Image: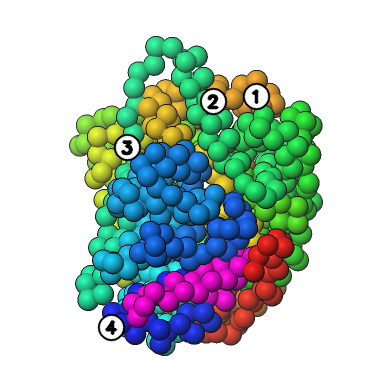
Amino acid sequence: MCGLLTFVSADATAGEHRERIASALETMHHRGPDETGVTTAGDDVVLSFKRLSIIDVAKSHQPIEYADGRYVMTFNGEVYNYIELRAELIEQGATFATDGDSEVVLAAYHHWGPESVSRLRGMFAYLIWDREERRLFGARDPFGIKPMHVLETREGVYFASEKKALMPFLYPRSQGLDTEALQHYLTLQYVPEPATLHERIRKVESGMSVSWSPGGQLTYSRYFRPTFDPAPVDDTDKLYLGIREVLEESVRIHLRADVPVGAFLSSGIDSTGIVALAKKHKPDILTFTVGYDVDGYSEIDIAQKSARWLGVTTIPTVVDAQQMMDALPRIVWHLDDPVADPALVPLYFVAEEAAKHVTVVLSGEGADEFFGGYNIYREPLSLRPLSGLPSGVRKGMLAVSRAIPEGVRGKSLLERGATPIRERYYGNARMFTEEEKQDLLVHYDPRVSYLDITRRFYDEAADYDDVTKMQYVDLFTWLRGDILVKADRMSMAHSLELRVPFLDTGVFEVASKIPLEQRITKQTTKLALRKALEGLVPPHVVERRKLGFPVPIRLWLKDVMYDWAMSIVDDSGTDELIDKAYVRNMLVEHRAGEVDRSRKIWTVLVFMLWHAIYVEHRLDPEPPKAVSRHATGT
């Protein structure tokens, strides 16, 4: 696990950039405080990294070389099936100097070429320089658990785990705000891949490999595309057993580490299931939960009840409004691009507590997208009587719905039933409407639409039913744009590795075949997963509604956070982008209780803090240097 920063020179002057690379690398010290490495491969490449030691602590240093120095690699992540791959490679004549997974990735590339990435089970972003061919090859894991950013310049190409490490090579540092990406952010609450809020810095997308040679062009190739293939089930018991077995196998290999491993525990079935399966292999596993001293906004009691039932210890963290206000600028600094999901904050604090006890935590991300866990996935079932009507009738319904005043019962149902899934669904979070953005933004571009983001995914999912289409879209939008960004950044902020056993290609292979009726019913979500975990998790969790880590910003923005929020708006240098009077009015309306504007307000506040840090350079919340927890780190 590490933060990588690699530069490939276009004109064989890599050595001249070594010191600048080493300096920029320090912005990611939190990703790997155990070891720093900077290597120059001739005049072509500078590879650098910050390492958090997890496996083969003493010997798996990076950048790592293979085949008598022909290949050199920087690697961020974990490959969980490395033991099995290592044995297979040894049979083919491979030799190894370490016991870790990094060298296995290099050996696999040497023996199997670029296709080797499809053999890896895990979370990863890596770059391999072939000195003989003078060629760079890199890849990012299938679902986008680990990040990789890219910046092309006349000097060459830069890659980094976090965007902040590329900012010193962007001239000037504040140039090129991507206003199209900003409009998408205000709709979705995150910046969709491959964009960032800086026009020239992009992301290597999930499931993609990349290659480049000096004098050539970056070439991207998709090596993994999730395919749903639901099949009828005659024996549901066999289905449930298969789900449990593949999950247990995934949890088992995700526990591989030479450092302490714990787990996050909320009130839901996803994290509880992970803990229950992990306890089989690690009976003393330590768990962590978080909540607030606000009625209805804490899962601590339920998590502690589950912990007692499972026979594990859980350590709770309670967060108050002042802690939240104090931490938010630093949280935004870690994010690189704004993500307006309030659940970032409790995740930041529970990760901080976990890092005092363990180096790795297991978490339940990905279960909802794989098994059909979001309540909104039930919408197509409820709309079937309307969405199945002839198109002419649905057009008439839409016209009628538009004539009905806001707030009148039935308006929303008619509108949704008459609107095709492509236009109706674009993710779990829906912030500002197009009409609202026209009022909020100083320069609104009507040509920018969320359909620009989802169109290609709906085209790829054209043959799926509506629920499966929603799941497929979420794998490429919500999951990698929100869920996995907050998981990576909030854990890495505390030099803590977060692992997600649900997001395993083996688990997906099983989940992708589950028929619709075993995923979603009118009464519940994730039916097959719930059935598979019955008896393994407490009864009070099996049917519990998904909450995640709820955050009481609706209440706090009315009182204790009101002046703080108003000061962020007043001080912000976003006048050329945002109508600040509109934002102030939202705050006033929210405080008066006329309407709940909390999520929209939060979305703007996070952007304004981001702008103050990365554009205005008015705020500098960079944390103090993390300290290595391993005596073997150098």
Residue 100 at what x, y percent from top left?
A: 53, 51
Which tag, 1 or 3, sits closer to the chain's start? 3
Q: Amino acid at mark 2?
A: Arg
Real-space CA distance between mark 4 and mark 3, rounded to the nearest whole angstrom: 41 Å
Q: Nearer the viewer, residue 441 or 312?
A: 312
Residues drawn in magenta: 25-50
- Label 1: which residue? 536
- What element does badge 3 sit on? loop
Q: Amino acid at mark 4?
A: Asp
Real-space CA distance between mark 2 and mark 1, rounded to the nearest whole angstrom: 10 Å
| Disc number lying in front (2 or 3) | 2
- What element does badge 2 sit on? helix
Q: Residues within 10 Å of mark 4 (few under 14, many from 20)?
A: few
Q: Quadrant of residue 184?
A: bottom left
Lateral position of residue 208 relative to residue 319, left or right: left
- Label 3: which residue? 227
- Label 4: which residue? 11
Q: Quadrant of residue 93?
A: top left
Q: Residues within 10 Å of mark 3 (few under 14, many from 20)?
A: few
Residue 172 at what x, y percent from top left?
A: 41, 88
Residue 150 at what x, y percent from top left?
A: 38, 69
Lateral position of residue 248 relative to residue 517, left or right: right
